[in-house]
Image (cartoon, helix red, strand yellow):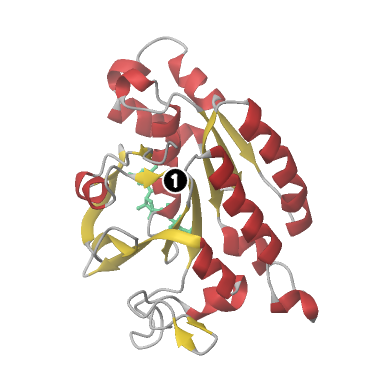
Amino acid sequence: EQLGGHLSTRLKGLDAALCGGIPFGVLTEVVGPAGIGKTQFCLKLSLLASLPAHYGGLDGRVIYIDVESKFSSRRMIEIGARSFPEIFHLKGMAQEMAGRILVLRPTSLSEFTESLQQIKVSLLQDQVKLLVIDSMVALVSGEHEQGAHRQHPLGWHISFIKSLAEFSRIPVVVTNQVRSQNRDESCPYSFQVQDKGKTIEDSTRYDSHLVAALGIHWAHAVTIRLVLEAKSGQRFIKVAKSPISPPLAFPFNITSSGISL
Ligand code: GTP
């Protein structure tokens, strides 16, 4: 069985901590406050997944679920042109790379549910090497459903997405916004995930509003959690949950060539 695949992030320390990058076949969650760089990170990953293998890419297609209309192919091409000028100066290459990204913009949870079936078919047929959902919590934040539905928010979707990752053995990256850490130092990230009275993730601090919105099931379903945060004007990316890495943090910047260490 082929278990060892990774999508390199090109962030050296992070790749080393994750034994090569974002792993295939599991869910990786990228969380952080508004404007920290979650979408910029996903744009970079999309570029790297679609890049020819010769340049270290996965030479595949990408499905990008763009819930809040944040995806910008123009920005992705800028990142590509700055990071890999030798490829992007070739005629038609920028267009070819942009054409490898299928951007879906569901406007409701039910539209998203429908698109999941279509995604499953694409994953089987179309050489898709990365699935991005930016963001998961935004899919439910617009919904005000009451009663039974709220008890297991997204339970079915979460299982389905996890199974998509497992059967297609591609990296699945999901972003989620958490409230800014600066507003109240004592509250955000201090939530401990409890299950049947036991603390299951005491080393992983997780925002309580995410648990409220996505349910405990979500916290379980995620294999890798990367937390993006800012301290004293410096951005950091932290490995907050991983079966292999200790909780390491790496400083990063966002420049014209995208996320870089
Ligand atoms: P939310 O979706 O609001 O939760 O934010 P996010 O975490 O997805 O943030 P996003 O990835 O949109 O990052 C926003 C930050 O990226 C901005 O504050 C800018 O610093 C940087 N950024 C965005 N676009 C560009 C760009 O074209 N050039 C450069 N140099 N930086 C950019």
The answer as to whether callout 1 falls within 8 Å of ligand 1 is yes
Q: Quadrant of residue 233?
A: bottom left
Tell me what residue is drawn at x 73 percent, y 38 percent: 118
Q: Amino acid at mark 1?
A: Cys
Residues packed near mark 1 inside 10 Å, few (<14), some (14 to 19) or many (20 plus) = many
Query: On the rendered structure, is 107 left or right of 242?
Result: right
Q: Label 1, secondary structure: give it.
A: helix
Residue 68 locus on image (x, y percent): 60, 53
Q: Quadrant of residue 38?
A: bottom left
| Farthest-out residue, top | 91
Tell me what residue is drawn at x 31 percent, y 22 percent: 55
Residue 210 locus on image (x, y percent): 53, 73
Tell me what residue is drawn at x 21 percent, y 47 percent: 16
Name the quadrant of the N terminus. top left
Q: Which residue is mark 1?
A: 42
Up/down of 180 relative to 134, above or below: below
Is residue 64 something one can see in this rendering?
yes
Up/down of 37 relative to 54, above or below: below
Is residue 146 something one can see in this rendering?
no
Q: From the viewer's side, name the closer residue of 167 and 12.
A: 167
Query: On the rendered structure, is 122 left or right of 17?
Result: right
Up/down of 50 relative to 145, above or below: above
